[in-house]
Image (cartoon, helix red, strand yellow):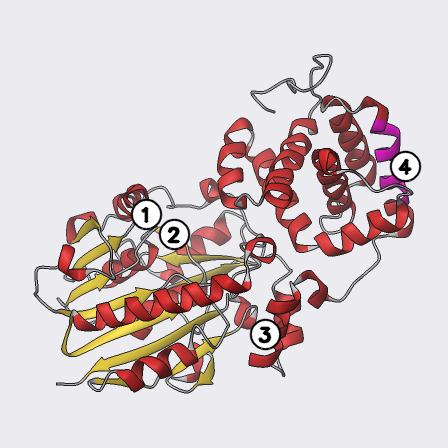
Amino acid sequence: MTRIQQDKQAPQRVAMAPGVPTRVLAAKVLAQVIGRGRSLKAELAKALPELDDSRDRALLEALCFAVLRRRGAYDAALAQWMQRPLSVREDELRALLLVGFAQLDALELPAHAALSATVDAARAMGRDRQAGMVNALLRRAQREGIPQRPAREAFPDWMADKIEQDWPEQADAVFSASLVAAPLWLRVNRQHGSREAVLAQLADGGMAAEGSTLGSDAVRLPVPVAVSALPGFAAGALSVQDLSAQLVADALAPRPGARVLDACAAPGGKSAHLLERDPTLQLLALDIDPRRLKRISETFARTGVGAQARVLAADATNPDSWWDGQPFDAILLDAPCSATGIIRRQPDVLLHRRPADIEALVALQGRLLDACFRMLAPGGILLYATCSILREENQFQVEDFLHRTPRAGFLPLDERFGHDSWAGRQRLPGEEGADGFFYARLLKKG
């Protein structure tokens, strides 16, 4: 149920039946994301607290993700089945229709309940006159199914072209893997116990889980559950983190007691992982946005590593404004990027990313590499990582850096980190159930 029992835009205030508020909120979130270019994460953060029941919150997220992953097919069905296209002013009604399609198609919810709740949602939104149309379109989708379309069509042409150019043999698999729901990956906190003990606890709770051969702290749940249901999550024994992100700790592998910088640390998961493995590290978690420091501190507090870390709001591209001049033995640069490797987790990337963004990100990544390398001790390691799959942000970025930096070299990573990408390794979306991720282990020569 929800705390909001009426929609203010409705001409008459009508109490919402169970399931209706979730559909209304989903339509409103999607109208903001699709029609106004808002962030899905930000809109969900505002909408989720309106729902008291964790099952309703999970459904809201599932509906929004399903629509954005299959939006091309749903838009095509609307264009084919409607005599008159909806106007721009009807963006919430259009979004509600997409929500209805997602329930029948991607989520495969019981048709009667999905149709009833969605039609009632139209009325609750003040769309009584269109409720019949909503019912008719959803019944047609139920009878005929949503016409299937190639996964590539969900991507902007410029992005799809880049992926095909960079990964011609894997492009079709990348397109498909980016449009399906990801499994739930968990990270076991070594300070709380072993992975085997966690797997046993999950099994006792009726949750099928398995360890990964690639990440020694990684546990995979094929069917996601609410974090509140995970044994030990609140106490910091478990964290939600994709396998690819967990492999960062293996790739950096700082020596015991090393002085470590996490240059773009929010929300703090990778820093926490390093400290869970080695509490003796002298770690500084840096982020340019002061508002994001709270997330880092909360992560450290929950996992119990806060005593071993410092948190600072500062710009990693401008060390002179904050750095004390003492070199770091190891630096993690998880750089801002296009997020093309995590579209299955951030499907609004397909809507919001523009070609000009890539040029700006590549320039920022280059500045971050140069500034961070300056702070690295001779013999130290800088791990450059992104959640992108575009070579210009990854392989070519590292190539350019090595060509302009005489004291820089690289240390090869083994094949468990993904495809060989010259000085680095590239994992593609869906491989081993993990996100797309790039790693390059750079060395500062003495």
In the picture of the structure, the residue carrying the numbered disc 1 is: 236
Q: Quick check: can you spot residue 216? A: no
Of labels 1 and 3, the one closer to you: 3
Residue 59, quarter of the rendered image? top right
Q: Secondary structure at mark 4?
A: helix
In the picture of the structure, the residue carrying the numbered disc 2 is: 239
Say which label, 2 or 3, has the lower sequence index.
Answer: 3
Alpha carbon of mark 2 to alpha carbon of mark 1: how far? Answer: 7 Å
- Establish if 65 lies above or below 114: below
Numbered circle sitting on residue 136: 4
Numbered circle sitting on residue 163: 3
> What amino acid does circle 1 point to?
Gly
Classify 10 Å Cα crowding around label 4: few (below 14), some (14-19), many (20 and above): some
Classify 10 Å Cα crowding around label 3: few (below 14), some (14-19), many (20 and above): many
Q: Which residues are magenta?
A: 130-140
**Residue in view at x 83 percent, y 53 percent:** 146
Q: In x, y percent, where is residue 114? A: 77, 37
